[in-house]
Amino acid sequence: MDFAEYPDRAAIRDTVAAITRSFGSSYYSAHAEGRIATDELWAALAKQGFVGINLPERFGGGGAGLAELALVCEETAAQGCPMLLLLVSSAISGEVIARYGSEAQQQTWLPQLASGETRIVFAITEPDAGSNTHQLSTTAVRDGEEWLLSGTKYYISGVDGAGAILVVARTGTDAQTGHGLLSLFLVPPDAPGLTAQPLPVAAALPEQQFTLFFDGVRVGADQLVGDENDGFTQVFHGLNPERITGAAICVGIGRYALARASAYARERDVWGVPIGAHQGVSHPLAKAAIEVELAALMTAKAAWLHDHGQPAGEASNMAKYAAAEAALAAVDAAIQTHGGNGLSAEYGLVPLWSVARLLRIAPVNREMILNYVAGHTLGLPRSY
Amino acid sequence: MNIVVCVKQVPDTWAERTLRPEDSRLDRASVDGVINELDEYAIEEGLRLAEAHEGEVTILTMGPDKASESIRKALSMGADKAVHVIDDGLAGSDALQTSAVLAQVLGRIGFDLVILGAESTDARMGVMAAMLAERLGVPQVSLASKVEVDGTALRIHRQRDYGYDKVEASLPAVISVVEKINEPRYPSFKGIMAAKKKPVETVTLADTGLDAGQVGLAAAATEVVSFANRPPRQAGTVVKDEGDGGTKAAEFLAGQKFI
Ligand SMILES: Cc1cc2nc3c(=O)[nH]c(=O)nc-3n(C[C@H](O)[C@H](O)[C@H](O)COP(=O)(O)OP(=O)(O)OC[C@H]3O[C@@H](n4cnc5c(N)ncnc54)[C@H](O)[C@@H]3O)c2cc1C
């Protein structure tokens, strides 16, 4: 076992932190409050090769793994600028296309993802099929060599500014289980028949969410990613990266919140001693610091397993669970430490709470992870 | 063009820096080391000149083991190779001694252009470029905010209070640069990975040909006789705006000779 921080990992951390710091946490909170995409930071990170760090080298990526992408997610968040679309575009879409995309799809999309020129967002959630993917009702029906897509997706992040949407659709039904057979399609946001309607969320996020209405959207065979009806397996390949990067963002948020809170608690003095001297203030922060550190370890383990081609489902789920809980505890304690300032626009903690709170629900909610651990790890029967 | 950039590792400028009571030396161990800020501008200028003139950039650093982090960063920004002068006998050397060591190494590795930051954030002497030029017998052009090389002609803008002077010299030469000169690049991920494979030559005191008795704290020409902590910061002056806030603020600034 080796817990050493290798020099190149330290250099990635330092550089990503330095780039992000030049924007600053106020850049993020202002964009979050204004619902404006953080495209400038995205471009700056992409320019130095950090957005496509996990993509294959022959398509302009860094040729590194998820461990490195997770560092990018963690360090941007640790400077107060969590980049949610890294989890969608670099983690899910990037990994799925690099693994299952045709040569032509890879040549078209991966260089653009690596350079930061465009993003590919991911659409699976539907109004009537949330956590239960087997219930998906968006369908792709064959029409000669082509397909016609119909149905509704919602809460799809970042459709504005995306070059394509990776859409999960039902292409058949398993005769034995009755479950949907799924396939993945790359659909341009301006495809005829596709309407993207902004879906306002109260959580302060720079990324906008959309409801997507597919009304007989025609897609060519060259837009099918991987094999027909194999979508479930393919999506699964992207889910662990999504959970690991989600966990990494949470670890970063936790670190940021704790750094801000402890700096504040060392200075702020209302009863003759800094408020950090009161255990009512210090203990929740200390507890959150332990939880964040534990979540960081689990996240590193999950990334390692994924990068070494070993089963990473359990570790990724555990990391995502632990990190979201730790980030929420850290941000909540940080807000409490700041008193009234904790809710101010100036101190910028509420937008980070929004992200941490979101990551308890998405990409997979806390309860589904507990179900997974109950069933998979502990061998307990299911209620559903 | 053979460009050498002298890079010093200094304690992080943002960290609390202290002197050690036992020998009045800066406590370097307990703070993170970073590349001296102006040296990043020197590296950037070296890289730009090398890109424009098909040159090669060598990083030259004198410092303890830990300084290899800074060398690595300079290499990840794009420098081609590095020379690390490392020897316990060098600890506590002052500017005069450091310049003797660096000049020896520069004489051996050769150069067309040596670039330095105008001063370091720790010692703030601002004399290294002059000392090196003197020892090497080449021109010094200092405080450059712009550098142009044309064959062996070197033209710079030398930053002054009133603007700049145009200064010319011929290569080989030593230049020091100021912050205005450029915007240092960040390392790229590819640069970080490539830095691992770039050659770093380590040079000991014996390799420089200097005598151990000439360098280090005991032989330093300067000595810190005493030091005191900076007095605690004074409470600020609050100007209350009762319709005349602007005038009062201006009076305050004028009183402090800021305007
Ligand atoms: C800001 C934001 C951005 C998003 N971005 C995207 C995106 O880019 N792409 C995309 O496809 N989706 C996206 N989503 C959707 C997100 O992934 C889903 O909201 C999430 O997976 C949960 O699905 P649901 O909302 O349908 O919840 P439901 O499945 O309806 O579940 C509701 C709640 O019920 C509980 N629950 C459900 N099932 C069980 C069970 N079996 N056992 C116990 N408890 C259970 C859980 O507590 C859960 O939180 C986004 C959502 C938000 C809010």
Image: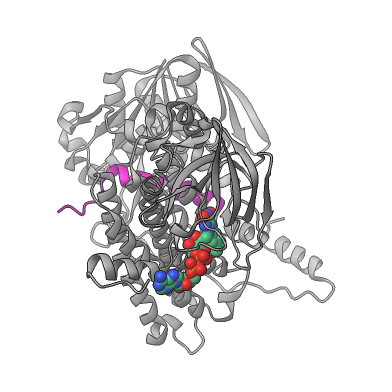
In the displayed structure, would residue A264 be above or below residue B45? below
**Does residue B157 appear left or right of residue B206 in this picture?**
right
Q: Nearer the viewer, residue A145 or A69?
A: A145
Tell me, yes or no, if residue A243 can be seen here.
yes
- Residue A371 image-quadrant placement: bottom left
Residue numbers of the magenta segment: A1-23
Quarter of the image with the N terminus of chain B is: top left
Q: Coloured how?
A: one colour
Question: For the image shown, how many numbered marks are present on the structure?
Answer: 0
Q: Nearer the viewer, residue A36 or B215?
A: A36
Q: Residue furthest bottom?
A: A271
Residue A199: x %, y % from top left: 65, 60
**Does residue A273 appear left or right of residue A141 in this picture?**
left
Residue A230: x %, y % from top left: 39, 43
- Residue A14 is a magenta residue: yes
Q: Nearer the viewer, residue A274 or B76?
A: B76
Q: Nearer the viewer, residue A115 or A139?
A: A139
Residue A261: x %, y % from top left: 46, 72
Quarter of the image with the C terminus of chain B is: bottom right
Residue ID at (50%, 37%): A113
Residue ID at (31%, 23%): B106
Residue B102: x %, y % from top left: 30, 30
Q: Residue furthest top?
A: B151
Tell me, yes or no, if residue A358 can be seen here.
no
In the displayed structure, would residue A221 be above or below residue A331? above
- Residue B247 is a magenta residue: no
Residue ID at (62%, 35%): B160
In the displayed structure, would residue A72 be above or below residue B167? below
Query: What secondary structure characterizes most of the magenta part?
Result: helix
